[in-house]
Image (spheres, rainbow, N blue to C red):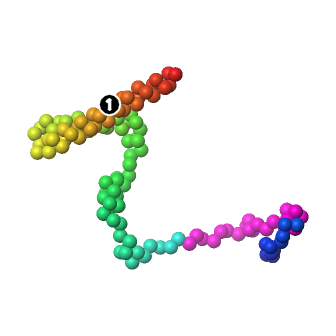
Amino acid sequence: MRVRNLDIGVERITRWQVSDEFHLPAEERAAPAFLPQPRHLDEILQRPSLDERLVDLLRPDAVDPDLLNPATLSRTRQEVAGLLGDAARAGHAAGGAFAAAVEILNADSRLDEEVRAALALLLRA
């Protein structure tokens, strides 16, 4: 394949023709992509910080896509608030923490209701 000099000047660009375009041959397949393999020394030297490890431990590996549905998320929040409320009333040692969690979940449920009401007003307009 012949390669043309790229330094051709402005006056020669005006005479550039379609046949002057060079493309890669269509019948040839592309070369395999180079993906470097992680090395063991890199894993040792570039260990994640405590903050990164905590986030990885708290984040589930697989999230059920149905949980991202607003109705399912709201229903799950209400069910968890009920379970935590039962645990708070049962006299567990962490009853205060359970009650605080129930209050937070109930506040989120109230915000969900406000958002639904606002959306209904927007859709009515």
- How far across and down, in percent of the image, does residue 106 sit? 27, 34
Badge 1 crowding class, 10 Å Cα cut-off, few under 14, some 14 to 19, many 20 or more, is few
Mark 1 residue type: Arg
Q: Is residue 38 left or right of residue 101?
A: right
Magenta highlight on residue 25? yes
Q: Is residue 83 left or right of residue 1?
A: left
Outermost residue toward the front in this view: 10
Q: Closer to the camera, 69 or 44? A: 44
**Label 1, on which residue?**
110
Outermost residue toward the top in this view: 124
Q: Is residue 110 left or right of residue 24?
A: left
Identify the magenta region: 12-34
Q: Secondary structure at mark 1?
A: helix
- Would you say residue 78 is visible in this rendering? no
- How far across and down, in percent of the image, does residue 118 sit? 43, 27
107 to 16, vertically: above or below: above
Magenta highlight on residue 52? no
- How far across and down, in percent of the image, does residue 91 sit? 10, 39
Hey, which quadrant is residue 14 in on the image? Answer: bottom right
- How far across and down, in percent of the image, does residue 123 sit? 50, 25
Q: Residue at x 76, y 66 (%)?
A: 23
Hey, which quadrant is residue 51 in on the image? Answer: bottom left
Q: Closer to the camera, 64 or 4? A: 4
